Amino acid sequence: MKILVAVKRVVDYNVKVRVKADNSGVDLANVKMSMNPFCEIAVEEAVRLKEKGVANEIVVVTIGPTAAQEQLRTALALGADRGVLIESTEELNSLAVAKLLKAVVDKEQPQLIILGKQAIDSDNNQTGQMLGALTGYAQGTFASKVEVAGDKVNVTREIDGGLQTVALNLPAIVTTDLRLNEPRYASLPNIMKAKKKPLETLTPDALGVTTSSTLKTLKVEAPAARSAGVKVKSVAELVEKLKNEAKVI
Ligand code: AMP
């Protein structure tokens, strides 16, 4: 079985993001970039399926600038076999990303496609679902367990107030939730080996996909600064403040 994993280059989750002075977006100058955490979980799941003998090839794909090769190399060091970079410096919306991924699916014909449930920069939570619509494949979103059984994949989904298990006919799309697995760290020898693994670079044009956006970001704002807290001396003072200052009781 061939697995395709989509990974996104995002601002590292430890970085406190700064909004640009003109409110046009987030300042990316000299900011540490990493693989989106949910995509790390997607890579880990694919590697585990390969280790179990369920999969025999893992192709990892990203859409982004030349530097997004770094995230592909990380995925290769974690156990993916081959990388595909679709080079684009545009700010792409989810539909454009899903169309590009669909073109890669058509080319690679994977049996299983694993994505993160959401990218932590845009918080869109829609690329996997859109790819599901474009391909017509079954989708299991917010997966906390994935088991391939013959020509089906059973996906346990985290839903409000519980878990739901669905059986999807392959080929299928899975998006990962936080509890699916705990990603491993890449070892130094594997980081070295990853440098020699194949990495193909494509363009949206070469895939015949137009990426023009139907959406424009008007403004990005930082959350309002929180005012400093105060220490109260007694419960009575706390109740008084909650009643008369915060007006919440
Ligand atoms: P989103 O719908 O933007 O929240 O992203 C959900 C998932 O779609 C991510 O975790 C990735 O697996 C995939 N994805 C989104 N953007 C990209 C991208 N530029 N390149 C590759 N995969 C992406």
Image (spheres, rainbow, N blue to C red):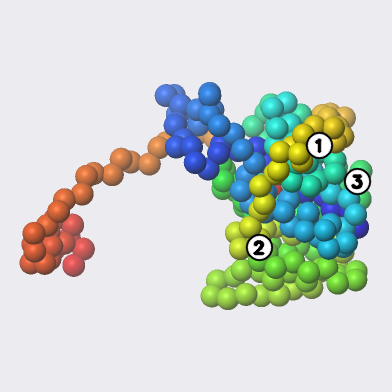
Residue on which disc 3 sits = 108
**Label located before the other in sequence (1 or 2):** 2
Counting from the top left corner in percent of width and height, residue 207 is at: 87, 34
| Residue drawn at 70 percent across, 68 percent down | 145
Find residue 11 and report its horizontal and vertical position in percent: 56, 36
Q: Is residue 24 above or below residue 77?
A: above
Question: In the figure, 240 relative to 27: above or below?
Answer: below
Residue 246 shows in the view: yes
**Residue density around tag 2, few if under 14, some if 14–19, many if 20 or more, within 10 Å:** many
Residue at far front of view? 189
The image quadrant that residue 162 belongs to is: bottom right
Which element is circle 2 on?
helix
Tell me the number on the disc at residue 193: 1
246 lies left or right of 210: left
Give the residue drawn at x 61%, y 38%: 34
Residue 188, quarter of the rendered image: top right
Label 1 is placed on what type of residue? Answer: Lys
Secondary structure at badge 3 equals helix
The residue carrying pointer 1 sits among few (fewer than 14), some (14 to 19) or many (20 or more) residues within 10 Å by Cα, namely some
